[in-house]
Image (tube, rainbow, N blue to C red):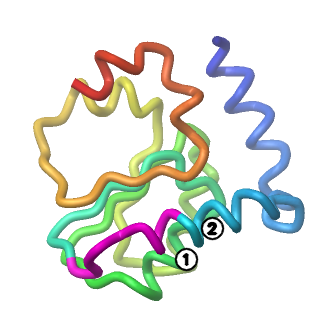
Amino acid sequence: MNKNLIKQRFSKSLEYYNDNAKIQKQMAEKLLSLLNRSQFDSILEIGCGTGLLTKLAVERLCYKTYIANDIVPDCESFVKELNPLIEFRSGDIEDLIKESSQKFDLIMSNASFQCVENFQDFIA
C-alpha cells in the first residue's frame, strides 16, 4: 500500500470531497447511531478527512478531549472550522499510535481502516 499516493489523492480532492461522499455520510450517521452512550472523556477520530463524522460527533456527543487525525495535513482547517478546540494530529495513524500511550474512551473511524497495513498490530 502506497500511503503517499493515498495522501496525494485525498489532498487533491478535499475541496469537492463532501459533495461526492454520499456513502460516507450515511456511514457516519450509522456509526453514531450504534453508540450506546453520548458522553466521553476522550475521543480519537482516525482519518477525519473533511469532517463528515467529526461534524456529527461535535453536534451529538459530549466530550472533554477530541483528537482528530488524518494523513493529510490540510484536513486540519476543515476540523478547526467545526470546532477550534479539537486537537488535530496529522500523520499516519499507525505511526502516531506507536508514539503515544494515551488512552481514549471512544476511538472511531469512518472508512479509513482499509488504509492500515498491519491491522492486527494496530488493534493490539
- For the point 84% across and 48% down, the residue is 13
- For the point 61% across and 55% down, the residue is 75
Disc 2 is placed on an element classified as helix
Q: Which residue is mark 1?
A: 55
Image quarter of residue 44? bottom left
Could you classify mark 2 by the number of other residues whose Cα lies within 10 Å: few (under 14), some (14-19), or many (20 or more)? many
- For the point 62% across and 54% down, the residue is 49
The verdict on residue 123 being magenta is: no
**Residue 46, labelled with which disc?**
none
Q: Position of residue 35 (x, y in %)?
A: 35, 70
Image quarter of residue 17? bottom right
| Dot 1 amino acid type | Lys
**Whole-Å distance between the Cαs marked 1 and 2?**
6 Å
Residue 91 vs 24, above or below: the answer is: above
Could you classify mark 1 by the number of other residues whose Cα lies within 10 Å: few (under 14), some (14-19), or many (20 or more)? some
Q: Position of residue 94 (x, y in %)?
A: 38, 25
**Residue 52, labelled with which disc?**
2
Is the Cβ of the residue at disc 1 closer than 8 Å to that at disc 2?
yes
| Dot 2 amino acid type | Leu
Which residues fall within the magenta stretch? 31-39
Q: Position of residue 43 (x, y in %)?
A: 28, 62
Q: Position of residue 45 (x, y in %)?
A: 41, 55
Image quarter of residue 60? bottom left
